[in-house]
Image (cartoon, rainbow, N blue to C red):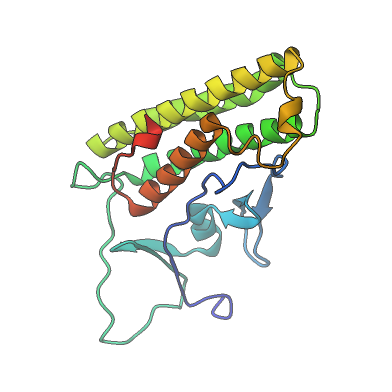
Amino acid sequence: MKRLLANIVIAGMIGCFSTSTPLAAQPKARVLVIEGQSGQAAVRDIEGRSYVDIEGLTQITGGSLRYQSNAIVLSLPGSHGSSSNQAPVVERPSAPADDSELSRDFMRAAIEEIASMREWASTLAYAIQNNYQVTDSWAANYREQAAHNLGLATTAATTGGDRDAAQLLRSEFEAVRDWSNRLVKEKQSMDTAKYALSANALRDDPQSQKIINCGRFLAQMLGSGKFADDPSCH
């Protein structure tokens, strides 16, 4: 186990919307398995990078999580340093004392919601630009999953910051929903050929830009661990 890692410091493991209109196909579900250890951790592929559920990783390695400033420290059995200069690490509770901060449970649920909205938007954009058949019942599967994850995030909100951030998540969900409904209607009326003329046509659409900018801001806010606001999410 010592050869695997000593102390892993992970800061800002946040999935977010791409900086351009997402065109990637639906990501595949995968899990992380460590040889010689029992259990597995969920892995999500976003923008060509793999993100692992840190709590699942902690469980299968038998380690422990601690929080220090904006860093998450994963300590593995036998990997604790003996240096007397090492600063003490105090575990942060799930619900922070500062009401404007975001709780751990809410941040986890919010990341899942952002990922589900991104999957919805990227798959729809790919289908529209490649002239695939798109119907409301097809889009409804993604819409319902995003609505479910939004409900989980809302339920997980325990601080003032959580509740304010949940409102921004809802605003982003409604923006993606309206954008999706518009594209489905345009597809039904055979008015989507304009998006195939240029690779940037759909990305540069004002409604698309609003969704992208809000998604990017939400990811940065979750990375900071504290509520903030931005006009792109209203």
Residue 148 visible from this viewpoint: no
Q: Residue at x 61, y 38 (%)?
A: 203
Q: Nearer the viewer, residue 190 or 54?
A: 190
Q: Is residue 110 left or right of residue 35?
A: left
Snapshot quadrant of residue 3? bottom right
* Quadrant (top left/top right/bottom left/bottom right) for the N terminus: bottom right
The tally of labels here is 0
Q: Residue at x 65, y 22 (%)?
A: 183
Residue 34 visible from this viewpoint: yes
Q: Residue at x 24, y 47 (%)?
A: 96
Q: Nearer the viewer, residue 210 or 150?
A: 210
Residue 123: x %, y % from top left: 69, 34
Residue 110: x %, y % from top left: 44, 39
Q: Nearer the viewer, residue 214 or 191?
A: 191
Residue 145: x %, y % from top left: 58, 26
Q: Nearer the viewer, residue 47 or 70?
A: 47
Q: Is residue 224 above or below residue 232?
A: below
Q: Is residue 92 above or below residue 131?
A: below
Snapshot quadrant of residue 129? top right
* Quadrant (top left/top right/bottom left/bottom right) for the C terminus: top left
Q: Is residue 125 left or right of residue 97?
A: right
Residue 138: x %, y % from top left: 72, 20
Q: Residue at x 41, y 42 (%)?
A: 218
